Amino acid sequence: MILAHGKIIEESRQGEIIAALKDEIPLILAQEGLNPELVIAACDRLSLRAQAGEFDAVAKPLLEMAHLPYEAYLSYARMFSGEGLRKKMSLELAGYPLGLEEVTPHLFRKRVALGVLLHIAAGNVDVLPAYSVIEGLLAGNINLLKLPTGDKGLSVKLLSELIAEEPRLADYIYVFDVPSAEIETMKALARYANAIVVWGGDAAVKGVRELAEPNTKIIEWGHKLSFAYATSQATDEQLKRLAEDICRTNQVMCSSCQGIYLDTESDEETNLFAERFFEILRQKNLEMGKASLGMRAKAALNVDNEKLEGKSLVLSSDGVSVIVYPDEALTLSFLFRNVWIRKLPEQRIIPILRPYRGYLQSCALCCEEGKAQDLSNSLIKAGICRICDGGMSSFTEGESHDGTYPLKDYSRIVDCLK
């Protein structure tokens, strides 16, 4: 199913609707424009409905498929609240003239929408495709959303209900189910866009660059890697909080901990820390309930292979593992409560992590208070966007997207006559 003109429509009409956009978009752009308060009020009502469980029948199967907890869905739903969105507008557009601002007696300046955004959503199954559209609406844009594989109707449901809350949004939201392999259709959508907002890994970004015209802006929200950085003086409470986040998210979110770098050059110290954290992770796993059998089976093959190769210290039990590697590489873990540990002395943070700068997102610091500032500075200089405690995957109002405020990217500043 797709969404156009405020209605859910059969996919068989998709080609016809996309072709008609050539004439419809200029007419919409000629209108007065979209008041962000309309968007915020509608989103607030929708957020309350989502938190009350109204969309659980669609959301829960998708969360299970994506190995995401229900609490993550509720966190996303709270991102739609009016209070949060108003704070977002205030933070992200601070210093941008929201109305006409006089520059000289005959010259004025204001913020306007880019025009049309094509959102190419990632394959993670959650509410982020709909939230990406809402960010585009807040900046005043017409939004064309290409659904990710596996969405299964959640984005169409949420956005159609948003339009039901505020029918004046209908002209600004289109949702299409176009396979990425349909290059000509994708190019047609790309030609309508002032900017393409792409969520995904290197292959997705590369594909969009090949689609886009030279005069089309590309805004990239790529896949990221997150990790923890610890010293041997990290407290049990810090490590328990980290273990809880690993178990709660099963490491499938961009902000989830994949592994732990330890501030040491000693193999013995690394192995002792690994044994300590493994016991904390194992206990937290039992307290919270083990991951599903399917998740454990996926990871078990990789963990068993590491044991057979005998190149690393492998600690595993009850469906969780900690693996010590001798190198300093930043890698994806085996997911589903399986964590790597590597040595990385403080003085090597910048030279080792900086080559990964385009992939770095969050780092949980587990260390004594006296070292936190210096370690944070080094991690930031290496390219980390977000320093946090062990609760890595919790959201705070006003957070950036990987170090950038999207509403600024979705807007432009024009000088004009009154």
Image (spheres, rainbow, N blue to C red):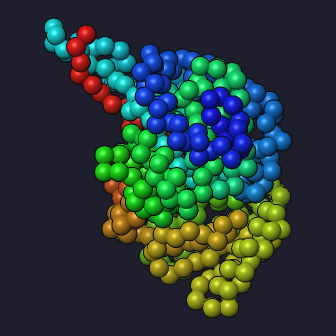
Query: Which of the pair 79/159 is nearer the observer?
Result: 159
Q: Is residue 83 visible?
A: no
Provide residue 414's location: percent of width, then percent of height: 27, 25
Provide residue 186's location: percent of width, then percent of height: 50, 52
Q: Quadrant of the N terminus?
A: top right
Q: Is residue 383 left or right of residue 125?
A: left
Q: Does residue 404 sit above or below 37 in this rendering?
A: below
Q: Residue at x 55, y 42 (%)?
A: 18
Q: Residue at x 68, y 47 (%)?
A: 12
Query: Which of the pair 288/250 is nearer the observer?
Result: 250
Q: Residue at x 72, y 42 (%)?
A: 10
How many labels sit on residues?
0
Q: Is residue 254 left or right of residue 126?
A: left
Query: Which of the pair 88/352 is nearer the observer?
Result: 88
Q: Residue furthest top?
A: 105
Q: Residue at x 48, y 25 (%)?
A: 28
Provide residue 155's location: percent of width, then percent of height: 67, 41
Q: Is residue 157 left or right of residue 399?
A: right
Provide residue 93's location: percent of width, then percent of height: 39, 27
Q: Is residue 191 visible?
A: yes
Q: Residue furthest bottom?
A: 309
Q: Does residue 191 sit above or below 334 in this rendering?
A: above
Q: Does residue 327 sit above or below 143 in this rendering?
A: below
Q: Quadrant of the C terminus?
A: top left
Res 332 → quadrant: bottom right
Q: Is residue 37 left or right of residue 10?
A: left
